Amino acid sequence: MRPRLPIWFRQPLPAGAAAGRVKGLLERQKLHTVCEGAKCPNRGACWRDSAAAFLILGNACTRDCRFCAIPHDSHPAPPDPGEPARLAEAAAALSLRHVVVTSVTRDDLPDGGAAHFAATIRAIRARVPGATVEVLVPDFQGDGNALDRVLAEHPDVFNHNVETVARLHPPVRPQADYRRSLAVLRHASQAGARTKSGLMLGLGETDAEIAATLRDLRAAGVALLTLGQYLAPSPAHHPVARFVPPAEFDRWRDEALALGFASVASAPHVRSSYHAEELVAAPCPAGRDGARPSKNPAEWCDPADGGTTSVSSALVLRKPSLPRPSSTFTAP
């Protein structure tokens, strides 16, 4: 039997004309969203606000993670070459200022879909030149050339989720690897990208494991962090071990900020792409639903780039130029 949602987690799913308009636009453009694919509980609210996290490279995944609702297919259809342009048109139609693009994992493709990510970033920049672009990428099986192909397009935010603590990777993400995910984030950070990652809580992790994971993420150079409650999509998925109360999310947010994360969204309903624009803009005005800007005085808000830049005394350390692509990156 699936556990009942606690009262403090329940929320209405807003409907209305705005949500219907977004859904209709996505259907007309033959686009997928992680909102629907992952059965996100926030999808109604996001669509009401004319926001969506686009899902590229199809709607079936070559991996079969036990936390995820997206269907598994070991031989999905080839990438659609027209998808980047249609996605950019949808972003323009929705007047998006911050476009979030994620994908299913495509271990069947030689580059894991990296070229498709790059084409999508270019299409968005051409069609909606004022928008920032956030990508949430798979691990590309540790292929540094694939990763560098995405980084060469300089996405405004580079997101890769570790999802859970190291001990729970085998039962929850059997085809992924905790150390490899950290290596992806470290590689992107060292290339000058603003990096982001996220954890689901309530899978059975301990406080000590959460704290260790936060330290690992900071050591990998991650600046932006999301923490949210895990929900099992079905009885066949990994069960919910417990519902983490809001006060604990507040505590983890404060601990993460103390570790030096630039901004943290930590609350039961937080998902990786929920209010992503507010999170990346911190510590300009505080975000919503658990997002709070850094209390660290070494974090400075640069209105020109909409985010934080670390400073040491009067020296502002801005994004360095991208190094030459490397063929591999090494897990710690």
Image (cartoon, rainbow, N blue to C red):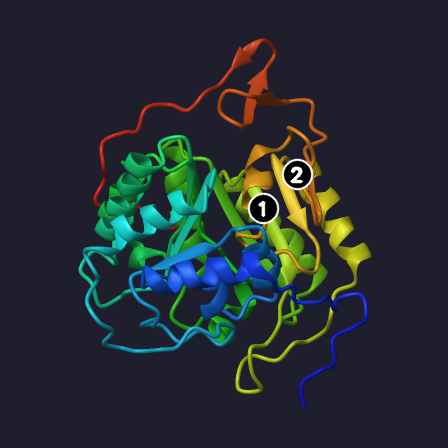
Local secondary structure at mark 1: strand
Name which residue type carries label 1: Leu
Residue contact between numbered discs 1 and 2, judged by CB atoms under 8 Å: no
The answer to whether residue 80 is left or right of residue 130 is: left
Name which residue type carries label 2: Leu
Residue at 70% in and 35% down: 286
Quarter placement of the N terminus: bottom right
Looking at the picture, does residue 57 appear above or below residue 158? below
According to the image, label 1 marks what residue? 225
The answer to whether residue 318 is left or right of residue 274 is: left
Q: Is residue 144 in view from this perspective?
A: no
Pointer 1 local density, CA inside 10 Å: few below 14, some 14–19, many at least 20? many
What's the CA distance linking mark 1 and mark 2? 11 Å
The percent coordinates of residue 88 (x first, y second) are 33, 46
Looking at the picture, does residue 9 appear above or below residue 320? below
Q: Earlier in the sequence, mark 1 or mark 2?
A: 1
Looking at the picture, does residue 38 appear above or below residue 156? below
The percent coordinates of residue 233 (x first, y second) are 55, 77
Local secondary structure at mark 2: helix
Residue at 31% in and 38% down: 127
According to the image, label 2 marks what residue? 259
